[in-house]
Structure formats: structure tokens, C-alpha cells
């Protein structure tokens, strides 16, 4: 099934003509400092922004109930519908919930039946439901879990970085939003220089680095914008 460029473009945002590929900065929240050394981060800088992880089908969880050996170090995998079964607590609908919410539900069930003050810990051991695909000119293409907040640069780094012949100005993110396929073209070198922000990636995104077939999707648009210094986003349709 072929994917064609839909009309019109969803978004086409350009920098001013003076912001060429050799210039640093350009994003509103980035300031180029007149300094030869990068300032050290303080304690608040070291606490990265994150979003809660939502459990999905076939994820593996490690569940511990403090002080009860029979209920500790239990490795449990969610089934195809995202449910788990835990001793004395029964079947729990885990899909779409955070590990913290599962902790609270198990504690509530144990407290009402068997344990006076249960203290439950749920940790994610392995995920197969919340993943991104990183393909193309990276050293290790494959599926990678999305835990917390992940950006494009982090996704490429997770795949051990770009390969020798990667096109840094030819990085495409494919995403489906409410049934609509979207694609965005990014310049990794421009992101590294601070020309625009490092975009966030989400579970089920497909990141393709330096793929000539993906480049052809943007053939007409690139005739208008031969020098890419901002993200180029288009809508796709299946025929």
C-alpha cells in the first residue's frame, strides 16, 4: 500500500533568512551565551521532566509486599488484554494504569481481606507494549522501550547513534494521531546546534534516519524549502 503526500501541508514553519545551518540558536527558549565553558547544572536541573508510564499487554512487572515472603519478588506478566493475577488480590485490570496505581489497588485488596497494613511495590521489569521503532542509518535499528520522557536525540542515542553514512538533515518521525498518519522531517544537526527544540517522541512512533525512500515523500516540499532549519510536518494518506 503506497503512502502519498496529502494536500494541504499540516504545518510549514520557517526561520528567518538569517538563520542558516551554521548559526547557533533560534528556538525561543534557547540563548547563545558568550562563554567558553558550559555552566554546571544545579540540583533542580538534574531532575528531568518525565511522564508516568502506563502498563500495557505483555509487560513484565516485579511486585513485592514488604514483610511477606510469599508475596515478594513476584515476576508477573500482563496478558494480551493487560490483566494480571496476584495471590490473595485476584485479577487486576493493569492496562492503562501506572505502577503506582497498581500498588494502591493491590494494597486496598489485601487490606480489606488479609493484611492489616500492606506495603506494596510495583516496578516495571520489561516492556513490549510502549516501544518506538528506530530504523535507517543508525548503528542498531530495532524496537526500544519508552519509559518516561524520550526525545528524538535520545531515541537515536538509544539505537547507539547514527551510522557512518547517515543524513543528519534527513530524519523522519512517523506518527498516527486519531487515525491520521503524520510525518515530520527533522534536521538532527540543527537540533544539536539549538536551531530548534529536540522534539518529544512517543510510543508507536517510527523514527527513520537517512532513509532515501522517506526522503522521496518530501520531494515536492523540499523544492520549496531546500534548506531545512525547522521541522517540516505533513499529513499522509493510504490509497
Image: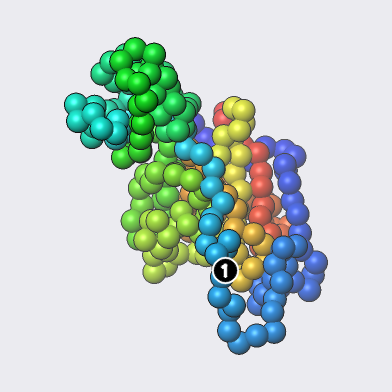
Q: Which residue is at 59% across, 27% downward? A: 179
Residue 183, percent across and down? Answer: 59, 44
Residue 193 lies in quadrant? bottom right
Is 162 or 4 nearer to us in this picture?
162
Q: Residue furthest left?
A: 70
Instruction: Determine whether the residue tagged by mark 1 lies in a helix, strand or loop.
Output: loop
The figure's colour scheme reads rainbow
Residue 18, percent across and down? Answer: 78, 74
Q: Is residue 166 left or right of residue 49?
A: left
Number of other residues with Cα within 10 Å of mark 1, as a class: few under 14, some 14 to 19, many 20 or more: few
> Can residue 216 be spotted in the picture?
no
Q: Is residue 42 left or right of residue 14?
A: left
Residue 86 in the image: above or below residue 21: above
Residue 164, percent across and down? Answer: 39, 69
Residue 89 in the image: above or below residue 228: above
Q: Which residue is at 31% across, 40% downward? A: 125
Residue 111 lies in quadrant? top left
Q: Is residue 36 left or right of residue 27?
A: left
Residue 60 lies in quadrant? top left
> Can residue 191 be spotted in the picture?
yes
Is 81 or 77 nearer to us in this picture?
77
Quadrant where the C terminus is found in the figure: top right
Residue 239 in the image: above or below residue 44: above
Q: Which residue is at 76% across, 59% downward? A: 14
Is 215 or 109 nearer to us in this picture?
109
Circle 1 sits on which residue? 42
Amino acid at each position: 500500500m503506497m503512502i502519498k503526500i496529502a494536500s494541504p501541508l499540516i504545518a510549514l514553519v520557517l526561520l528567518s533568512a538569517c538563520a542558516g545551518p551554521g548559526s547557533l540558536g533560534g528556538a525561543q527558549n534557547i540563548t547563545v551565551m558568550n562563554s567558553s565553558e558550559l555552566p554546571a547544572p544545579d540540583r533542580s536541573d538534574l531532575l528531568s521532566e518525565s511522564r508516568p508510564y502506563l502498563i500495557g499487554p505483555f509487560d513484565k512487572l516485579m511486585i513485592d509486599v514488604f514483610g511477606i515472603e510469599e508475596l515478594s519478588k513476584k515476576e508477573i506478566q500482563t496478558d494480551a488484554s493487560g490483566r494480571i493475577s496476584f495471590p490473595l488480590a485476584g485479577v487486576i485490570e493493569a492496562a492503562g494504569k501506572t505502577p503506582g496505581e497498581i500498588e494502591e489497588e493491590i494494597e486496598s485488596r489485601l487490606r480489606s481481606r488479609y493484611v492489616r497494613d500492606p506495603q506494596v511495590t510495583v516496578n516495571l521489569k520489561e516492556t513490549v507494549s510502549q516501544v518506538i521503532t528506530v530504523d535507517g542509518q543508525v548503528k542498531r535499528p530495532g524496537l526500544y522501550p519508552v519509559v518516561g520522557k524520550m526525545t528524538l536525540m535520545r531515541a537515536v542515542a538509544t539505537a547507539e547513534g547514527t551510522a557512518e553514512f547517515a543524513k543528519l538533515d534527513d530524519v523522519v518521525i512517523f506518527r498516527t494521531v486519531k487515525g491520521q498518519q503524520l510525518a515530520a522531517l527533522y534536521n538532527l544537526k540543527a537540533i544539536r546546534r539549538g536551531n530548534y527544540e529536540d522534539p518529544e517522541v512517543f510510543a508507536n512512533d517510527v523514527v527513520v534516519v537517512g532513509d532515501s525512500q522517506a526522503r522521496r515523500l518530501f520531494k515536492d516540499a523540499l523544492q520549496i524549502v531546500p534548506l531545512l532549519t525547522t521541522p517540516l510536518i505533513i499529513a499522509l494518506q493510504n490509497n
